[in-house]
Image (tube, grey):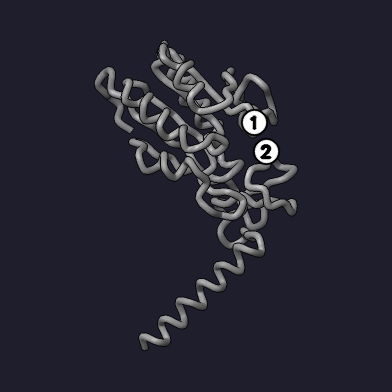
Amino acid sequence: MLSIVHRNIGWIEVICGSMFSGKSEELIRRLRRASIARQKVAVFKPRIDVRFSDDHIVSHSELKLASRVVENAWDILEQSLEAQVVGIDEAQFFDRDLLVVCQKLANMGKRVIVAGLDQDYRGEPFEPIPQLLAVAEYITKTHAICVVCGNPANYTQRKIQNTERVIVGASDIYEARCRNCFEPPEDVKTEVKLSGKGRRKKKERSG
């Protein structure tokens, strides 16, 4: 990251990865440094996330920072007009309006730091993080430790049988897995298997 920047130049930073990879911890670290630098900081999280606190963002390592709870992305825009730095945690719980809001904030000259899951429990891109990655100036990919083999983990394994995409939980419902140990739902396995067969048939025909 550039150590010297011109004033009034905004940008977007995205911190993404699996659960238990330190995303919130890294977000808190950057926001605290901004506060030490006497910058005006506004911190937000979605109302759906009340796992550890109603008015703080909290990492799995129990670091915490006071935050405002909002119903939707547009509330962030309205409540951060005076801020120089805007922090947003658990971005995957917002809809695609978050992309528009972050772009507007950055265009207003603000530093916008967003943290969230980039993949869901199926191992598929978790909107709106992919869209934010496309427009962000700075991207940090964090990794957890696979609970099965100890390798770097990039996937979030759901331990219960439920097909809802959004289920708020922690280690009671989820655990970190590497690519090798990740077990996607049966329908995802079937899709991958079928697509693999299609590629093989195409190869045979071309041969």
Q: Residue 24 at what x, y percent from top left? A: 55, 32
Pointer 1 residue: 49
Question: Residue drawn at (40%, 32%), measured in percent from left and top?
Answer: 100
Which is more N-terminal, label 1 or label 2? 1
In which quadrant of the rendered image does the C terminus lie?
bottom left
Q: Residue 78 at what x, y percent from top left? A: 46, 17
Question: Residue drawn at (57%, 67%), measured in percent from left and top?
Answer: 191
Q: CA distance from mark 2 to mark 1?
A: 7 Å
Taking the image as shown, residue 16 lies to the left or right of residue 104, namely: right
**Could you say which quadrant of the image residue 203 lies in?**
bottom left
Question: Residue drawn at (60%, 43%), measured in percent from left and top?
Answer: 19
Pointer 2 residue: 168
The secondary structure type at the circle numbered 1 is loop
Mark carried by residue 97: none
104 versus 137 height, above or below: above
Give the amino acid at mark 1: Asp
Foreground pick, 188 / 61: 188
Taking the image as shown, residue 111 lies to the left or right of residue 127, namely: left
Taking the image as shown, residue 31 lies to the left or right of residue 157, namely: left
